[in-house]
Amino acid sequence: MSAPIAEPYRLAIAVLAAGASRRFGDTDKLTAPFRGKMLGLHACDTLREIEAHHRWVIASKGGHPCEGGWRDAGFEPAVNPEAALGMGTSVALAAQMAMAEHADALIICLADMPLVPAEHFASIIAKVQNRGEGYIAATGYDEVRIPPACFAKGWFTPLTQISGDKGAREFLARGAAVPCAQELLIDIDTPETLAVLSESSTD
């Protein structure tokens, strides 16, 4: 009697790109040039190396200037009509879509963190895969837990209940820590941070 064929691991990836960019001024920061392309394209271009069944970018509206690049990297834009209410609504939407697609796990990451390497995403996935439905792995150093993070499907329903600006912070605190060099975890919130990182890439 032959052994049953194992079902493929169904990973979903959601890149959160629906923030208001208030600290960046009047410009949509994701369209700002950074190292040869728009800032908002870097995370998706890195994540195209990760095998996944479903890929989404959560945006605040359709027709974003990065949309063509997102699609080229294999990501489907998904509009969050409640984006103005905070990041939590984007996390909730991502979890709803992951549930609908019967995903085994969901990676949540931010479009304004362009330096996170593919190897780190792979390490987070490896922490969660085959460890049960109630597992979380988050980027961690010291006592800090931040995105990128991966949630096994047992967390999807609680994630759909998130709202406001806190995002998945209380869930991340329960996650296993996956270390990453802190200089690769910078999120670009201001023109000054963008300028400093752009200059460092030319040194």
Image: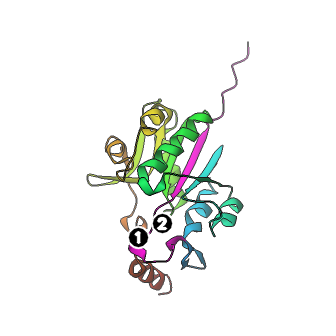
Residue 86 at least partly seen? no
What is the x, y in percent for residue 187? 42, 67
Kind of residue sitting beneath label 1 = Arg
Q: Is residue 70 above or below residue 154?
A: below
Say whether residue 102 is left or right of residue 86.
right
What is the x, y in percent for residue 100? 60, 35
Few, some or many residues within 10 Å of mark 1 (<14, 14–19, 20+): few
Q: Tell me how far mark 2 sits from mark 1, CA to CA.
A: 13 Å
The quadrant of the rendering that contains the N terminus is top right
Q: Is residue 24 magenta?
A: yes
What is the x, y in percent for residue 131? 47, 32
Front residue (pair 113, 127): 113
What span is colored magenta in the figure?
Answer: 1-30
Front residue (pair 18, 174): 18
Front residue (pair 116, 179): 116
Front residue (pair 120, 135): 135
Residue at 59% across / 57% down in the picture?
A: 47
Residue at 37% across / 50% down in the picture?
A: 164
Q: Is residue 129 magenta?
A: no
Few, some or many residues within 10 Å of mark 2 (<14, 14–19, 20+): many
Q: Main secondary structure of the magenta part?
A: loop
CB under 8 Å between callouts 2 and 1?
A: no
Kind of residue sitting beneath label 2 = Asp
Q: Is residue 129 above or below residue 87?
A: above
Q: Is residue 201 above or below residue 157?
A: below
Task: Give the residue at mark 2.
Answer: 112
Residue at 38% across / 54% down in the picture?
A: 179
Question: Which label belongs to residue 22?
Answer: 1
Question: Which label belongs to residue 42?
Answer: none
